Amino acid sequence: MRRLFLGTLAGVILAGAAFAQGVLKPDPAIRDTIQSQLDAFMADDVGAAFEFAAPNIRRMFRTPETFGAMVRQGYPMVWRPGAVEYGDLREIGGFLWQRVLVTDRAGRQFVLEYQMQDVLGDWRIAGVRVVPAPGVSA
Protein backbone atom coordinates (compact mmCIF):
# COMPACT_ATOMS: atom_id res chain seq x y z
CA MET A 1 0.00 0.00 0.00
CA ARG A 2 2.80 2.38 0.91
CA ARG A 3 4.61 1.57 -2.34
CA LEU A 4 1.43 2.28 -4.33
CA PHE A 5 0.99 5.61 -2.55
CA LEU A 6 4.61 6.64 -3.13
CA GLY A 7 4.44 5.58 -6.77
CA THR A 8 1.27 7.58 -7.27
CA LEU A 9 2.74 10.59 -5.47
CA ALA A 10 5.88 10.44 -7.64
CA GLY A 11 3.73 10.25 -10.77
CA VAL A 12 1.72 13.28 -9.74
CA ILE A 13 4.87 15.27 -8.95
CA LEU A 14 6.48 14.35 -12.28
CA ALA A 15 3.31 15.15 -14.23
CA GLY A 16 3.06 18.52 -12.47
CA ALA A 17 6.69 19.30 -13.19
CA ALA A 18 6.30 18.41 -16.87
CA PHE A 19 3.14 20.51 -17.09
CA ALA A 20 4.80 23.50 -15.40
CA GLN A 21 7.85 23.35 -17.69
CA GLY A 22 5.82 24.80 -20.55
CA VAL A 23 4.65 27.82 -18.51
CA LEU A 24 5.83 31.11 -19.99
CA LYS A 25 5.97 34.66 -18.75
CA PRO A 26 2.57 36.39 -19.23
CA ASP A 27 2.28 38.33 -22.48
CA PRO A 28 0.09 41.44 -22.18
CA ALA A 29 -0.37 41.59 -25.96
CA ILE A 30 -1.92 38.10 -25.96
CA ARG A 31 -4.25 39.02 -23.12
CA ASP A 32 -5.17 42.28 -24.90
CA THR A 33 -6.09 40.36 -28.07
CA ILE A 34 -8.36 37.97 -26.20
CA GLN A 35 -9.93 40.73 -24.13
CA SER A 36 -10.50 42.88 -27.21
CA GLN A 37 -12.35 40.03 -28.88
CA LEU A 38 -14.45 39.46 -25.75
CA ASP A 39 -15.23 43.18 -25.61
CA ALA A 40 -16.30 43.09 -29.27
CA PHE A 41 -18.66 40.17 -28.58
CA MET A 42 -20.13 42.05 -25.62
CA ALA A 43 -20.79 45.02 -27.94
CA ASP A 44 -22.35 42.71 -30.60
CA ASP A 45 -19.59 43.81 -32.98
CA VAL A 46 -18.88 40.53 -34.77
CA GLY A 47 -16.90 42.38 -37.43
CA ALA A 48 -14.40 43.60 -34.85
CA ALA A 49 -14.35 40.20 -33.10
CA PHE A 50 -13.61 38.49 -36.43
CA GLU A 51 -10.55 40.72 -36.89
CA PHE A 52 -8.90 38.98 -33.90
CA ALA A 53 -9.29 35.55 -35.50
CA ALA A 54 -6.26 33.91 -37.13
CA PRO A 55 -6.32 33.21 -40.87
CA ASN A 56 -7.34 29.55 -40.37
CA ILE A 57 -10.47 30.63 -38.46
CA ARG A 58 -11.26 33.37 -40.97
CA ARG A 59 -11.03 30.86 -43.85
CA MET A 60 -13.18 28.36 -41.99
CA PHE A 61 -16.06 30.75 -41.22
CA ARG A 62 -15.59 33.19 -44.14
CA THR A 63 -17.84 35.96 -42.77
CA PRO A 64 -18.14 37.75 -39.44
CA GLU A 65 -21.80 36.77 -39.27
CA THR A 66 -21.09 33.04 -39.61
CA PHE A 67 -18.32 33.34 -37.06
CA GLY A 68 -20.59 35.23 -34.65
CA ALA A 69 -23.33 32.61 -34.99
CA MET A 70 -20.86 29.85 -34.16
CA VAL A 71 -19.65 31.67 -31.04
CA ARG A 72 -23.21 32.47 -29.87
CA GLN A 73 -24.26 28.83 -30.25
CA GLY A 74 -21.07 26.99 -29.32
CA TYR A 75 -19.43 29.32 -26.80
CA PRO A 76 -22.19 31.27 -25.03
CA MET A 77 -19.86 31.86 -22.06
CA VAL A 78 -17.57 33.78 -24.42
CA TRP A 79 -20.40 35.66 -26.10
CA ARG A 80 -21.63 37.03 -22.78
CA PRO A 81 -19.10 36.39 -20.02
CA GLY A 82 -19.83 37.45 -16.47
CA ALA A 83 -16.18 37.52 -15.37
CA VAL A 84 -12.84 36.73 -16.99
CA GLU A 85 -9.54 35.81 -15.33
CA TYR A 86 -6.31 35.05 -17.14
CA GLY A 87 -4.24 32.06 -16.15
CA ASP A 88 -0.98 30.66 -17.42
CA LEU A 89 0.46 31.03 -20.89
CA ARG A 90 1.94 27.72 -22.01
CA GLU A 91 3.84 26.32 -24.93
CA ILE A 92 2.44 22.92 -25.82
CA GLY A 93 3.54 21.07 -28.92
CA GLY A 94 5.08 24.20 -30.39
CA PHE A 95 1.90 26.26 -29.96
CA LEU A 96 1.12 28.99 -27.43
CA TRP A 97 -1.99 28.45 -25.31
CA GLN A 98 -3.44 31.11 -23.01
CA ARG A 99 -5.62 29.68 -20.25
CA VAL A 100 -8.68 31.79 -19.38
CA LEU A 101 -11.21 31.18 -16.62
CA VAL A 102 -14.63 32.46 -17.69
CA THR A 103 -17.58 32.69 -15.34
CA ASP A 104 -20.85 33.00 -17.21
CA ARG A 105 -23.72 35.16 -16.04
CA ALA A 106 -25.32 32.18 -14.28
CA GLY A 107 -22.16 31.71 -12.19
CA ARG A 108 -20.89 28.58 -14.00
CA GLN A 109 -17.13 28.46 -14.52
CA PHE A 110 -15.37 27.34 -17.67
CA VAL A 111 -11.68 26.89 -18.33
CA LEU A 112 -10.80 27.82 -21.89
CA GLU A 113 -7.50 27.57 -23.68
CA TYR A 114 -6.90 29.99 -26.50
CA GLN A 115 -4.40 28.92 -29.13
CA MET A 116 -2.50 32.02 -30.19
CA GLN A 117 -0.73 32.70 -33.47
CA ASP A 118 1.61 35.52 -34.38
CA VAL A 119 0.38 37.00 -37.67
CA LEU A 120 2.73 39.64 -39.01
CA GLY A 121 3.62 40.80 -35.50
CA ASP A 122 0.08 40.79 -34.11
CA TRP A 123 -1.45 38.06 -31.95
CA ARG A 124 -4.50 36.33 -33.38
CA ILE A 125 -6.73 33.58 -31.98
CA ALA A 126 -6.26 30.31 -33.89
CA GLY A 127 -8.65 28.22 -31.80
CA VAL A 128 -10.35 27.83 -28.45
CA ARG A 129 -10.90 24.65 -26.50
CA VAL A 130 -12.88 24.05 -23.34
CA VAL A 131 -11.01 22.01 -20.72
CA PRO A 132 -12.41 20.48 -17.54
CA ALA A 133 -12.63 23.06 -14.77
CA PRO A 134 -10.52 22.53 -11.65
CA GLY A 135 -12.27 20.38 -9.09
CA VAL A 136 -14.72 18.97 -11.64
CA SER A 137 -14.76 15.23 -12.18
CA ALA A 138 -16.95 12.92 -14.18
Image: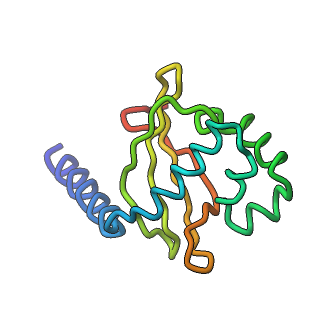
Percent x, y for residue 122?
Answer: 56, 72
Question: Which residue is found at the position 51% from the left and 73% from the top?
Answer: 93
Percent x, y for residue 109?
Answer: 46, 31
Is 97 left or right of 46, judged from the image as shown? Answer: left
Percent x, y for residue 117?
Answer: 58, 70
Is 84 left or right of 68, judged from the image as shown? Answer: left
Question: Which residue is found at the position 21% from the left and 58% from the top?
Answer: 10
Above-or-below relation of 132 to 6: above
Above-or-below relation of 46 to 53: above
Residue that sits furthest to the left in the current view: 2
Name the foreground residue: 93 vs 50.
50
Is 7 left or right of 52, judged from the image as shown? Answer: left
Coloration mode:
rainbow
Percent x, y for residue 105?
Answer: 53, 23
Above-or-below relation of 11 to 117: above
- Where, by quadrant of the figure, is residue 15 drawn? bottom left
Is 90 left or right of 67, judged from the image as shown? Answer: left
Question: Which residue is found at the position 70% from the left and 37% from the top?
Answer: 44
Residue that sits furthest to the top in the current view: 106
Name the foreground residue: 107 vs 21.
107
Name the foreground residue: 37 vs 59.
37
Quadrant where the image shows the N terminus: top left
